[in-house]
Amino acid sequence: MITEDFITLDKLCSLYKVKMSFFSDLNEIGLIEILTIERTPCIHQDKIMDIEKMIRMHYDLNVNIEGIDIVFNLLQKIEDLQNELIATKNRLH
């Protein structure tokens, strides 16, 4: 595991001006995975775009954590269906 690929939650909290409890709630519901590296809670940098979307939904649109979970699950289903459609089209050609 390369530690440069991770960003600390403290850094994210100060950067986005959100509370640590926001990330804890997202972790509890399964939307993000918090890893502890050298006793510091971190998130993989590949998830930053998703986290930014979640922060905007929560603070700008007033969507609660459960609503964010629903939105991300629906977005995942749409992506899966789009991939399936592309695969089907490729098989037809």
Image: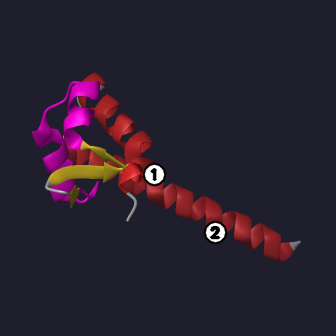
Asked if residue 33 is positioned above or below residue 23 in the image, the reply reads below
Three-letter amino acid code of the residue under disc 2: Glu
Residue 88 x %, y %: 73, 72
Residue 44 painted magenta? no
Residue 24 x %, y %: 14, 49
**Is 46 left or right of 67, judged from the image as shown?**
right
The magenta span reads: 9-34
Residue 10 x %, y %: 19, 37
Residue 23 painted magenta? yes
Three-letter amino acid code of the residue under disc 1: Leu
Q: CA distance from mark 2 to mark 1?
A: 14 Å
Residue at the farthest bottom position? 91
For label 1, the residue is 75
Q: Nearer the viewer, residue 74 or 16?
A: 16
SS label for mark 1: helix
The residue sitting at 72% across, 64% down in the picture is: 86
Q: Quadrant of the N terminus?
A: bottom left
**Is 33 left or right of 90, judged from the image as shown?**
left
CB under 8 Å between discs 2 and 1: no
Using the image, tell me which numbered label, if any, was put on residue 2. Answer: none
Q: Nearer the viewer, residue 53 or 7?
A: 7
Q: Quadrant of the C terminus?
A: bottom right
The residue sitting at 21% across, 32% down in the picture is: 13
Task: Provide the major secondary structure of the magenta segment.
Answer: helix
Residues packed near mark 2 inside 10 Å, few (<14), some (14 to 19) or many (20 plus): few
Asked if residue 51 is positioned above or below residue 79 in the image, the reply reads above
Residue 11 x %, y %: 25, 34
Residues packed near mark 1 inside 10 Å, few (<14), some (14 to 19) or many (20 plus): few
Which corner quadrant of the image does residue 18 belong to?
top left
The residue sitting at 19% across, 51% down in the picture is: 41
Asked if residue 91 is positioned above or below residue 43 in the image, the reply reads below
Using the image, tell me which numbered label, if any, was put on residue 84. Answer: 2
